[in-house]
Structures are given as C-alpha cells and as structure tokens.
Amino acid sequence: MKTKRKWQVVFKPYATNQIMLLPPSLEELIDDKHPVRVVNQVIDKIDLEPLLKKFKGGGTSCYHPKMLLKVLVYAYLNNVYSSRRMEALVKESIPFMWLAGMNKPDHNTINRFRSDKLKDVLKQVFKQIVLLLAEAGQVDLKELYLDGTKVDANANRYTFVWGNNIKTNKERIRKQLNDLWDYAQSLAAEELQDTSPVEFNEINPEKVSQTIQKIDTALKGKPVDKKVKQKLSYARRKWPQSLEKYQQQEETLKGRKSYSKTDTDATFMRMKDDHMQNGQLKPGYNWQISTNNQIITNYTIHPSPNDTTTLIQHMEQHKELYGHSPDVLTADAGYGSQENYEYLESNKIEAYVKYNYFHKEQKQKQQDPFNSQNFYYNPEKDCYYCPMGQQILLVGQRKRTTENGFVQHSKIYQAQNCTGCPLRGMCYKSQGNRQIEVNHKLKQLKARAREKLLSEKGIYHRKRRPADVEAVFGIIKGNHGFKRFLLKGKSKVEIEAGLIAIAHNLRKMVA
Ligand code: SF4
C-alpha cells in the first residue's frame, strides 16, 4: 500500500519590525503611468500666480498651495471628498504621501484652503487645464454640448422657507390690521379723526407698530370687546417681529421661491434621483456644464431649477474665460426660449437647441388640423382661419417677464362664434369661443430652430448630445458616486463643482 507523502508548508518571510538597510524611496514605489503622476505634471505646468497672491506674508510658514491643490485634485479624482479622509490619506497612502512631499496637512488646513483660498481662482486653474487639453487636440472649444443636473445640497430638507408662505402671512397680517382699524374707527371715530389716514397696501414693522399704537390710544377707556383686546395684545407683541423676520427672509430669497435655513443659497427643487418616489422637493443646486468630447469646458452653479434661465449666464462665462463664444451649441428642449434663441443669434452661435413639443410636433403636425399651429395665418389682416373657415381675430396682447427680466410679447386671437359648430368637440374643450395665444417672434425663432434641427448637421448633433454631455453626468454621479455637495453656500459649491470638473477632465487625460 502506497503511503501519502506529506508536504511541508512553506510561508514567505513575515516580520513587521524588519529594519531596512536603505529606506525605499516613494518615487520608486509609484508606477510610471500612475494617475498621480499626471496630476502632478499638469498642476506643475499651471500658472498659480493668482492663488499665490492670496497668501499674505508674516507669521508662521504655511503649506505650499501647489501641494494642497494637488492633494485636493487627486483626492477628488479618487472619489474622496471629505477633508478628514484626505488628512488620513496624506499619512497613509503612498501616492498621496509622494504628492504631498511627506507634508501632513490636517483636515482644517485642507478645508480652509478649499473653501477660502480657492475662491475666485479655481476657475482659472480649470481653464488652463482645458486649454492644455485643447492644445493636445482632446477637446474642441468651438463645438459645445450643454446640459444641467440638480444636485442635493448639504442642507436639511425640513428647514424650509417658502416665498408663498411669506406672502400669505403678510397678507393675513395686513387684513387683520385693516379689520382692527375699522373696529377702532367704529368705536372711536372722533379720536381717530385727526390722525393721518393709514395706508395698508404695503406693510412694514414700523407702520404696523405705529398703527397699533394709534388704535390703542384711540380705544383707551372705551368698552372694547374682549376678543379684540386679546388680538391687539397679540398684534403688539408678535406682528412687528414677524414682519421683520419676513423682510429678512425675502432678502435671502432674492426672487427665488424657497430656500433651506441650513444652506440659504440652496433652493428646493425636484430631483431626478427620487428614491422615495414621492416627488418631494429637496434643497439643491442646478449644476450646468458644457462639454466637448466628454471633457468639461465650463461649469456654472445656479439657484433656479429652470434650465432656460441658465444658458445666457453660462455662455457669457465661457466668453469671459476663453475670449470667444463657441461656433456651435447643442442643447435639449429645456433651453428653447425666445430669450435664449435671440441671444444665440445675436452672438452668431449656430444653435441646435430643441424647444418644448419639438418631437411631438414632428409626429402630430401633419395630422392635427385643430392644432393652432396649423391654422392658416393672414399677415396682412393679422388674423387666423380655423378648419371651419371662420376668422380668428386679434382681441388683445399679453406681456410676460421671465425670471431673468426678459419681456415677451404675445397676441391673443379669438374666434367670433363657435356656438353650434359641428367640429366643436374635436376643436377645444374650454368654454366660450376658441382663443389662441401666439408669440410671433418666438414662432419665427422656432421655425428657424426646427429647420436647423431637422438638417443633416442637426441630426448629427442631436444624436451626439446625450453621448457627450449627458454621459459626463452619468460618469460623475453613477460611476464616481458624487450625488451631494458637501460644502455649504453657492461660492463653496462652485469650488466643489470645479474640483469635480478638473478631476473628471484629468481622468479623461489619464485614459
Ligand atoms: S369650434 Fe370654433 S374655432 Fe373650432 S372649428 Fe369650430 S368655429 Fe372654428
């Protein structure tokens, strides 16, 4: 019978307290093609003069801003956004230790540098990296794709302030003050005769205090109803304070509909990633980027959830950064407004920007004779003709001002008599005669946009847009898990967006 041979187990040498004759150099531990080398080389090429100017002389020595910038960019490239984690990495991770030159900045230093020193200078760093990529032929600054996404702010979703609530509360106070004034007049008309009339249309804390004082003086010694007494006492104590608070809140709102008390720059908006599926609004920022070849060429942060209002500011910033507008811009239907079309035309930008119902219109236009867009228009008489041949005449004009203050004019046309029309059921659902509203200028702009969008070039850019710009958000949010800004306040959020954009571009460079 054969006996089984027993193999001896051999372990590799293991000793944690082993002393090396020559300490290893960090340089040789890092691979030649390691991404940390790309970060190092790129930041070394950049002119950091504006950043260096932010440091004042005197006092103790400080960490070199170039080192801190490299550490931050490399951390973002590795999906590390927390300053405490960065502090740990510069002590433990070989690439970080090499990049930091064995410096060990703590999380406070990293955070202060990120929030304060990078303010107003990071965009220049970003621009120089984009220009390096343009020189290398990796990006074309003349042909851009624009898109936006909403990103959660680092703010509590339950500490909200709504503009509409402020309006309602102010209106309630105004109405109740008016009632108290009327009551006082009914009881002490003589005493109030000499007092100047009170204007209740616009109320403020001073006016409310003065009015309550006048009412108090007039009602002194009069048989005042118990409930009115209680109301007056409440008004005296609470209303001026409340109005002062509303004034401050309105100043913080700056024309927005809402904000979060824990990050007053964050606006409540509907997010795409709605895990609860309940349509809950969350505090966030609207992050806009323009790309070419999946490389971010510009980024902007906006408080408004509406993409339409962001295009001009974004393109103006592009012009400021690179000294020229792009030749071609492609964007989705969220940007198709009169204001944007006019801006793009006046800046000679070849725009492939869709408008609402562009796709629906392509399907329905030929088939639906009741769509007002298919009604025959007579420009001499400035009237339309419906499918029954009835004239739809001009009855009025309407003026609308957009969030950006742009004024749009449209005309209202109305059919003269729709009663008894056999096509009434198919034509429209509302009561009265059919009315249509037409913005002729926008109609012309849409016609020009449609022509471009349906051209061969238009189809090419429309097909390329999702793979170019939308994919970048997919990479950042999906692959790298960036779903929430960590810093608070618009200027700091802009820095974070910039670091993410730089990290993304460097990743493309490495690839
Ligand atoms: S309902 Fe009025 S607008 Fe419509 S087809 Fe009849 S007459 Fe014309």
Image: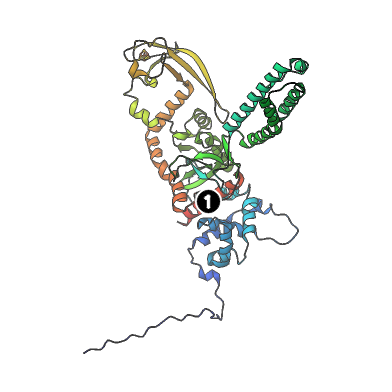
Q: Quadrant of residue 233?
A: top right
Please tell me which residue is depicted at 45% across the width and 44% down the height of the picture: 274
Task: Name the residue nearer the viewer: 34 or 112.
Answer: 112
Residue 210 percent location from the top left of the image: 75, 26
Please name the residue shown 47% across and 13% down the image. 394
Q: Is residue 324 visible?
A: no
Q: Is residue 30 above or below residue 124?
A: below
Q: Quadrant of residue 426?
A: top left
Q: Amino acid at mark 1?
A: Ile
- Relative horizontal placement of residue 238, taking residue 417 as reference (left or right): right
Q: Is residue 279 left or right of residue 403?
A: left
Residue extending farthest to the left is: 1
Residue at mark 1: 500
Q: Which quadrant: the C terminus? A: bottom left
- Residue 37 at x, y percent in the picture: 52, 62
Q: Position of residue 125 (x, y in %)?
A: 59, 50
Residue at image point 68% right, 26% down: 226
Taking depth in this image into account, of 228 and 242 the one nearest to the observer is 228
Q: Secondary structure at mark 1?
A: helix
Q: Position of residue 35 (x, y in %)?
A: 50, 60
Q: Would you say 393 lies left or right of 108 here?
A: left
Q: Dot 1 surroundings within 10 Å: few (below 14), some, or many (20 or more)?
A: many
Quadrant in which the N terminus is drawn: bottom left
Quadrant hosting residue 433: top left
- Residue closer to the observer: 58 or 226: 226
Ligand 1's quadrant is top left
Q: Is residue 161 visible?
A: yes
| Vertical comparison of 377 with 361: above or below | above
